[in-house]
Image (tube, rainbow, N blue to C red):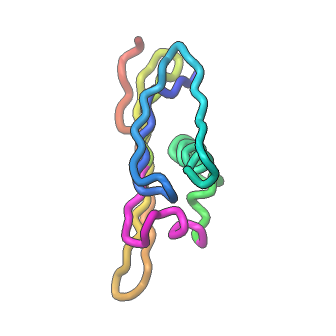
């Protein structure tokens, strides 16, 4: 079973910076006003874990996800999967080279820990 323990989001839509540690024994509710970033948090988490098809990877929409055109976007998730601790990170760099907008996306399994 996948249990997310911590989420860090930088520069995606209305979320400038978010760092949340979840209680492993509780239930988490994401609440807020319209436009506060609730859906962005969930979409960013899905993108970090599963990649394509989660809204952040459609080429035409990528620049709309960054807070400003020059922002790098990233999501890092710490999780426990069947007793193994892992950290997954995905990032997106939107930049311009010689007047042409370039998009660079990367993903990595950063750490696989010992079974807890």
Of the 4 image quadrants, the one containing the N terminus is top right
Residue drawn 59% across the image and 42% down it: 32
Residue 1 in magenta? Answer: no
Q: Please give the name of the residue rendered at 61% of the width and 64% of the height, measured from the top-left corner.
A: 58
Above/below status of 24 relative to 86: above
Residue at the image point whose x is 37% and y is 71% from the top: 70
The relative height of residue 38 versus residue 26 in the rendered view (above or below) is below
**From this viewpoint, which residue is outermost toward the bottom?**
99
Q: Is residue 113 above or below residue 99?
A: above
Residue 61 in the magenta stretch? The answer is yes
Residue 101, picture quadrant: bottom left
Residue 106, image x, y percentages: 42, 55
**Residue 8 image position (x, y, % from top left):** 41, 41
User: Which residue is found at the position 43% from the left and 72% from the top?
Assistant: 69
Q: Residue furthest front?
A: 33
Q: Name the residue nearer the viewer: 6 or 109.
A: 6
Where does the magenta region start and end? 60-74
Which quadrant is the C terminus positioned in? top left
Q: Which image quadrant is residue 104 in?
A: bottom left
Determine whether 59 is above or below 73 in the image. Answer: below
């Amino acid at each position: 079973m996948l249990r997310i323990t911590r989420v860090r989001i930088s520069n995606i839509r209305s979320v400038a910076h978010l760092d949340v540690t979840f209680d492993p024994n509780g239930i988490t509710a994401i609440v807020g006003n319209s436009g506060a970033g609730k859906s962005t948090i969930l979409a960013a988490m899905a993108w970090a874990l599963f990649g394509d098809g989660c809204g952040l990877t459609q080429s035409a929409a990528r620049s709309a996800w960054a807070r400003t055109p020059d922002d790098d976007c990233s999501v890092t998730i710490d999780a426990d999967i069947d007793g193994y601790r892992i950290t997954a990170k995905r990032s997106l760099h939107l930049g311009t080279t010689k007047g042409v907008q370039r998009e660079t996306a990367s993903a990595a399994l950063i750490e696989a820990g010992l079974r807890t």
